[in-house]
Amino acid sequence: SDYKVREIVNLAISENRKILTRNRELLLKKAIVRCYLLKNTDPKKQLKEILKLFDLTTLINPFSRCTACNKEFVFQPGQAEAKPRMKL
């Protein structure tokens, strides 16, 4: 990432955020209260690690938001039977 360690620390403090990192240097900063060192290097395994750590697996609802605008889909009665408008 383009962020320097000090910038990450400042953002985490000012926005009350947790830091997820593979950078051990961040763990040594006294100002950081909430930091987690990711054990895995593979992004898919990191995702699983984070979901388990923060108990987020029950909150996952795939395909519930538009990938273009991030708005939630609203399903109407009978919509399950609707035919797609685009040829696949």
Image (cartoon, helix red, strand yellow):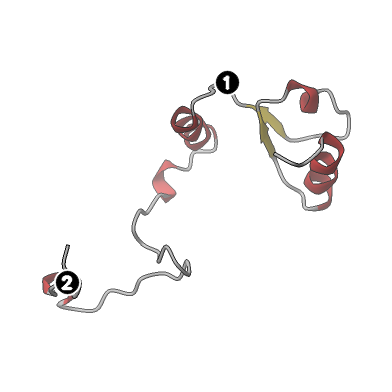
Query: Residue 83 at x, y = what percent?
Result: 12, 73
Q: Which amino acid does label 1 sit on?
A: Lys
The disc, 2 or 1, on the residue closer to the chain's N-terminal end is 1
> Image point 48% across, 70% down: which residue?
69
Which mark, residue 39?
1
| Residue at figure coordinates x 71%, y 25% from the top left | 23
Residue 60: give x, y in percent of width and height. 40, 49
- Look at the numbered disc 1 and give the secondary structure of its residue: loop
Query: In the rendered image, which quarter is residue 84 located in?
Result: bottom left
Image quadrant of residue 31? top right
What residue sits right under mark 2 in the picture?
Answer: 84
Instruction: Please give the label number shown on residue 55.
Output: none
Q: Mark 2 touching mark 1, by CB under 8 A? A: no
Residue 88 vs residue 41: left or right? left
Q: Residues within 10 Å of mark 2 (few under 14, many from 20)?
A: few
Q: Position of residue 6 (x, y in %)?
A: 87, 38
**For residue 65, above or below residue 18:** below
Within 10 Å of the Cα at label 1, are there few (<14), some (14-19), or many (20+) other Cα atoms? Answer: few
- The residue closer to the viewer here, 58 or 43, is 43
**Where in the figure is residue 22, as x and y percent of width and height?**
66, 26
Residue 79 located left or right of residue 34: left
